[in-house]
Image: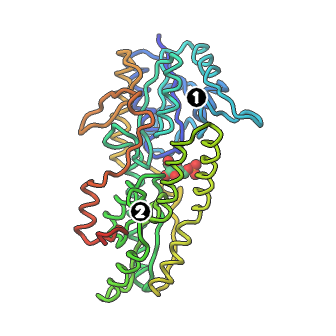
Amino acid sequence: SRNLGILTSGGDCPGLNAAIRGVCKPAINRFDFQAIGFRDGFRGLMQDRTLRLEDELLSGILTQGGTILGTSRDKPNKMPVGDQVLDMTNVMVETYDRHHLDALICLGGGGTQKNAKLLMDKGLNVITLPKTIDNDVGLTDITFGFDTALEIATDAIDKLHSTATSHHRIIVVEIMGHRAGWLALGAGVAGGADVVLIPEIPYDLERVAEAIKKRTKSGKRFSIVAVAEGAMSTKEHAEFAAAKKRKQEAPDKETKQKIKAELASLDRARGDHTVHLTHLLEELVGMEARLTILGHLQRGGTPSAADRLLATQLGTKAAECLNEEQFGVMIAARGHDAVPVPLTEVAGNRKLVPLDHPWLETARRVGTCLGDESA
Ligand code: F6P
């Protein structure tokens, strides 16, 4: 029989277990593969820590959040080993060969697609699936995990409404999404947030304050402000853009490293960005404000029906590709279909919210302040 290896990498999300099941059930039962899972992402592949995936283990996991395999954010080419950071891709190739694998299935977000491509470049047969609550993977309509997180964030906005109304407060709610605004925008529109701030649209706080004051004048004595964790003011955005440009134009490696460190410290300085934002709004508007950070709640719990369906569909399609020896692909969601797309085109291709996206237009039409001139 043939052998497959499977791993989950990057931040976990609901739907990973449904996808593992979706890949392994048909691979084992229809295509006669033996399946092993590597624990904790690429680290488990490096250390050869495995789990035999048989029918029994795959039973009952469809509805479970998280990943039965465990995950980590470790990268094959920048792996912390002791006090060093090393390129361990060749060690991973050795593990692959030791288990006589015919293919490696990697479930992950944008980072994982890049990491899987590194292994593909070393000659491994790789198939990937797009998972992340951030929905920021290129070439796929949607990633699994997003729908569940969207539901959680929307539910939080619903709940914050009643307390904001009772206390006549501004409630700022920070929503995950890394550098993309899909989750904040989706939940903001679905939950009827009054202000939605996303990384793709640098915001002007004065405009946000004005929009809230306008609401007060019209008799609405509370406001919900949904902020994506990656959102930036116009000033912050200009600083980042300038540093990025300098990095691109850097004459040598040393200067590039220096600017990289500068970018990282700008990022760190933004650590409590939403805390500042809440204080500033309180001052500018003259109304009590509170902050809620939804954090990892957004990644926990049972996957929604839509995510189970998507993860199962993409997973079973991956098993078909495996059987047909179609490698070097990510299984993308396109309309109602699951379609293999070249991994070379996916790796490094981050999907942000396009400025002409219908959800943005919808938000504007319904009167949501996006922090820009449309406010
Ligand atoms: O990529 C998923 C995500 O939840 C992002 O939305 C967030 O920026 C990040 O992971 C948080 O990472 P960690 O779980 O390592 O704190």
Compared with residue 88, is residue 169 higher up or lower down, i.e. above or below? below
- Residue 345 percent location from the top left of the image: 38, 30
User: Dot 2 lies on which element?
Assistant: loop
| Residue 300 visible in the current orientation | no
Compared with residue 76, is residue 217 higher up or lower down, i.e. above or below? below
The extreme front residue here reads 251
Q: Residue at x 41, y 38 (%)?
A: 349
Query: Left or right of 240: which side holds 156?
Result: left
- Residue 81 percent location from the top left of the image: 72, 33
For the residue marked with disc 2, what is the amino acid? Pro
In the picture, residue 62 is in which quadrant?
top left
- Residue 281 percent location from the top left of the image: 48, 78
For the residue marked with disc 1, what is the amino acid? Phe
Q: Earlier in the sequence, mark 2 or mark 1?
A: 1
Quarter occupied by the C terminus: bottom left
Which residue is labeled 2 in the image? Answer: 202
- Residue closest to the eye, 327 or 352: 352
Q: Residue at x 47, y 44 (%)?
A: 64
- Residue closest to the eye, 46 or 351: 351
| Residue 285 visible in the current orientation | yes
Query: Left or right of 342: which side holds 177?
Result: right
**Comparing labels 2 and 1, the label whose residue is closer to the camera:** 2
Query: Left or right of 346: which side holds 275?
Result: right
Label 2 crowd bin: few (<14), some (14–19), many (20+), radius 10 Å? some
In the picture, residue 130 is in which quadrant?
top left
User: Dot 1 lies on which element?
Assistant: strand
The extreme top residue here reads 1
Which residue is labeled 1 in the image? Answer: 38
Q: Residue at x 31, y 64 (%)?
A: 189
Label 1 crowd bin: few (<14), some (14–19), many (20+), radius 10 Å? many
Real-space Cα distance between discs 2 and 1?
A: 41 Å
Q: Report if the beta carbon of the residue with label 2 is closer than 8 angstroms to ligand 1.
A: no
